[in-house]
């Protein structure tokens, strides 16, 4: 139930006792977080995605021969419940039907035994044909259909395990693609080499989903392009694959298997993300691992641990987010007035310190001299610390008081050194690697999921500048000066910044403004004021801000979408950090947050405001609606002197 702030305080949010109204809202939020904190000191909010994960689970269960009828029925119920009126499925709340997820969901329903005459399948078939049919699906969708012989292996793009032979000095090697793509592709290369086919149930028939592809005319430029080059190489490789010496293939598979096992050895599943974990189990099956083998069982159990089973439905999380959630929650609590030595903060800080990564991961390939340190997003993902999480953790630890201050200081020092060592040559930061930015590689055939690279981005760079400011760095510090130069180059003509990991321009603009001001750029700087004016332009009549995932496909729609608590909070913090302390827009934004807080101290929403892969995969961070409003209310109270 949405309530007015007056219901808990007896005061109008804009009344004479506004300070008390804001304080009451903050206290309610503090109590909410205190009530749900885990006994170990962390928070982990459910992370929601689209229905493709449930559909892939149904496929996976049939492939490895572990179909649980009860779970399958619940999976089918989830898929049916999320179908749109036009017969398709979308990749974010309120979005249009998308071909790949529609094919996957319709295929999963068939595997689950839903009859072809069922209205849901009839409408799904009409929709996916309207969207282009099987000829138009991406390489990963084709791959999973290939496991059941429903897409010819000779028409799938090559993912040869011989990629493991390519040295790191070579222009293209597995370390030139993003960490998540690397973890997905290595097990897929094992599957591609084996090319298994498991018989689909007799009830499965997707023959009508094929639509004759209309050949397109190629311009001279297209005939002589990098894309054509890569597809030509792919065609040549597939024709010559049968001539590869058996010992060469065996060695390639051995290297891929060893890489995969090494990266699974510390628990949490391969890269601790759904698609890599799913592919790893299938790859182990292809390599001949018995299903009772401890390695197979561990990989299977870790994957199944992502399942959320409800009374009559089930769904899957793409991963867990405890480090990220705990860092933001702790920072929000501290910034909104909870004492640094409060048990809630101290327990969170202690838990975060214990999550520090102490081994060298994949990042060392391109950053060989960087020190060990940093934090990952998940419970266990030691090979993949990331700069965004690490910066947030460091800011959460900055003011925390725990019994072992000396230990905290050593941990913070290592973390700072690691984050700073991960700066790319363009002055910005990517999430997991240094200089993971060879744009030409986006044209290789299996890069059609729009996530092959992990280049520098404005939002991560802005957060790291904010972190530097917390620890006393200023623009005389060379990495900060280089980062500022990068941010200035990344600003859009209209004053906004693109948000890579949050939706979208509101997220990027807030974090860029915040980072610039925290490192010492004056608020009257033209770049900051252009960003401020952009935020002002897109405030809604209800006082809030909102922007949909559709802005990644259609940038002209930036700033448009239903108001949400966290996007409103991002905009309010951007405006305040940009110097608009007493502006009416800030007051209206705070009113929106106060009016939409629930009696339980939290906020509610349905929108997806997290970005996995732009245009392909989006997330609903269920903690965002609570972290950021609290952070904004705390900042507002601070600058107003309440």
Image (cartoon, grey):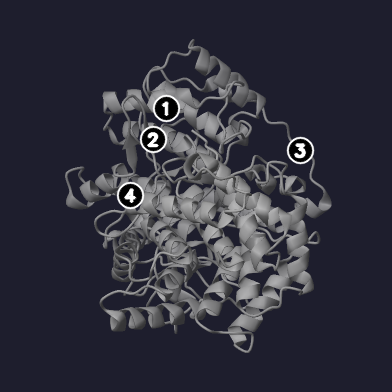
Indicate which label's residue lies in the foreground, 4 or 3: 4
Q: CA distance from mark 1 to mark 4?
A: 27 Å
Real-space Cα separation, disc 3 to disc 2, in angstroms: 39 Å
Relative to 69, residue 634 above or below: below
Residue found farthest to the top? 117
Q: CA distance from mark 2 to mark 1?
A: 7 Å
Q: Which mark is residue 216?
A: 3
Q: Quadrant of residue 617?
A: top right
Q: Whole-percent x and y of residue 624? A: 49, 51
- The answer to which quarter of the image holds residue 595 is top right
Residue located at (40% from left, 24% from top): 76
| Contact between labelled residues 4 and 2, with CB atoms less than 8 Å apart | no
Q: Earlier in the sequence, mark 2 or mark 4?
A: 4
The secondary element bearing badge 1 is classed as helix
- Mark toward the viewer: 3 or 2: 2
| Dots 4, 3 in contact, CB < 8 A | no
- Residue 482 falls in image quadrant: bottom right
Mark in the foreground, 1 or 4: 4
**At 55% across and 64% down in the image, what residue appears?**
642
Marked residue nearer the N-terminal end (1 or 3): 1
The residue singled out by tag 2 in the image is 315
Labels 3 and 2: the sequence-earlier one: 3
**Residue assigned mark 4:** 36
Q: CA distance from mark 2 to mark 4?
A: 22 Å
Circles 1 and 3 in contact, beta carbons < 8 Å: no
- What residue would you read off at disc 1? 78
- Where's residue 225, x and y in %? 74, 57
| Callout 2 touching callout 1 (CB < 8 Å) | yes
Q: CA distance from mark 1 to mark 3?
A: 38 Å
Give how far apart the Cα atoms at labels 4 and 3 are. 56 Å
Task: Judge depth for marks 2 and 4 and give the one in front.
Answer: 4
Mark 4 vs 3, N-terminal side: 4
């Amino acid at each position: 139930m949405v309530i007015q702030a007056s219901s808990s305080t007896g005061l109008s949010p804009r009344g004479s006792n506004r300070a008390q109204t804001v304080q009451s809202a903050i206290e309610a939020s503090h109590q909410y977080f205190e009530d749900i904190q885990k006994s170990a000191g962390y928070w982990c909010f459910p992370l929601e995605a689209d229905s493709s994960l449930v559909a892939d689970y149904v496929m996976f269960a049939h492939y490895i021969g572990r179909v649980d009828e009860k779970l399958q029925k619940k999976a089918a119920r989830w898929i049916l419940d999320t179908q749109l009126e036009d017969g398709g499925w979308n990749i974010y709340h309120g979005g249009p039907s998308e071909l790949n997820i529609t094919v996957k969901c319709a295929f999963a329903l068939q595997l689950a035994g839903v009859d072809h005459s069922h209205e849901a399948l009839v409408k799904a078939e009409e929709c996916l044909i309207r969207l282009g049919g099987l000829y138009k699906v991406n390489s990963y969708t084709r791959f999973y259909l290939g496991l059941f012989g429903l897409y010819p292996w000779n028409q799938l793009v090559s993912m040869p395990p011989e990629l493991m032979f390519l040295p790191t000095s070579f222009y293209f090697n597995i370390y030139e693609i993003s960490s998540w793509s690397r973890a997905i592709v290595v097990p897929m290369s094992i599957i591609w080499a084996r090319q298994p086919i498991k018989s689909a149930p007799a009830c499965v028939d997707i023959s009508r989903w094929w639509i004759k592809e209309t050949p397109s005319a190629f311009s001279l430029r297209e005939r002589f392009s990098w894309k054509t080059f890569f597809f030509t190489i792919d065609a040549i490789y597939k024709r010559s694959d049968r001539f590869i010496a058996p010992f060469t293939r065996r060695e390639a598979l051995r290297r891929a298997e060893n890489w995969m096992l090494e990266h699974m050895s510390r628990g949490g599943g391969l890269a601790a993300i759904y698609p890599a974990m799913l592919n790893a189990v299938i790859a182990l099956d292809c390599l001949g691992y018995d299903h009772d083998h401890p390695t197979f069982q561990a990989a299977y159990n870790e994957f199944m641990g992502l399942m959320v089973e409800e009374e009559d439905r089930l769904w899957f999380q793409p991963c867990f987010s405890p480090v990220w959630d705990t860092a933001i929650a702790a920072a929000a609590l501290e910034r909104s007035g909870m004492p640094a030595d409060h048990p809630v903060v101290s327990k969170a800080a202690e838990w975060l310190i214990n999550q520090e990564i102490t081994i060298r991961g994949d990042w060392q390939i391109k950053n060989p001299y960087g020190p060990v340190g940093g934090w990952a997003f998940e419970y266990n993902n030691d090979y993949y610390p990331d700069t965004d999480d690490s910066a947030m953790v460091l800011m959460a630890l900055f003011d925390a008081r725990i019994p072992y201050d000396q230990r905290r200081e050593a941990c913070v020092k290592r973390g700072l050194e690691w984050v700073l060592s991960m700066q790319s040559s363009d002055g910005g930061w990517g999430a997991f690697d240094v200089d993971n930015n060879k744009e030409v590689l986006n044209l290789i055939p299996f890069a059609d999921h729009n996530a092959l690279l992990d280049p520098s981005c404005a939002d991560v760079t802005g957060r790291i500048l904010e972190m530097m400011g917390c620890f006393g760095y200023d623009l005389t510090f060379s990495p900060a000066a280089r980062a500022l130069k990068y941010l200035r180059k990344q600003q859009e003509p209209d004053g906004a910044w693109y948000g890579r990991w949050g939706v979208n321009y509101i997220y990027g603009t807030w974090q860029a403004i915040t980072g610039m001001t925290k490192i010492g750029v004056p608020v009257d700087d033209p770049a900051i004021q252009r960003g401020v004016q952009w935020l002002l332009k897109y405030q809604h009549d209800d006082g809030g801000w909102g922007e949909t995932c559709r802005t990644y496909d259609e940038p002209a729609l930036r700033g448009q979408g239903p108001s949400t608590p966290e996007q409103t909070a991002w905009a309010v913090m951007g405006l305040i950090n940009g110097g608009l302390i007493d502006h009416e827009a800030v007051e209206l934004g705070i009113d929106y947050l106060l009016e939409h807080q629930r009696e339980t101290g939290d906020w509610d929403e349905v929108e997806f405001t997290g970005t996995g892969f732009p245009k392909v995969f989006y997330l609903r961070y269920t903690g965002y609606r609570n972290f950021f409003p609290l952070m904004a209310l705390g900042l507002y109270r601070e600058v107003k002197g309440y």
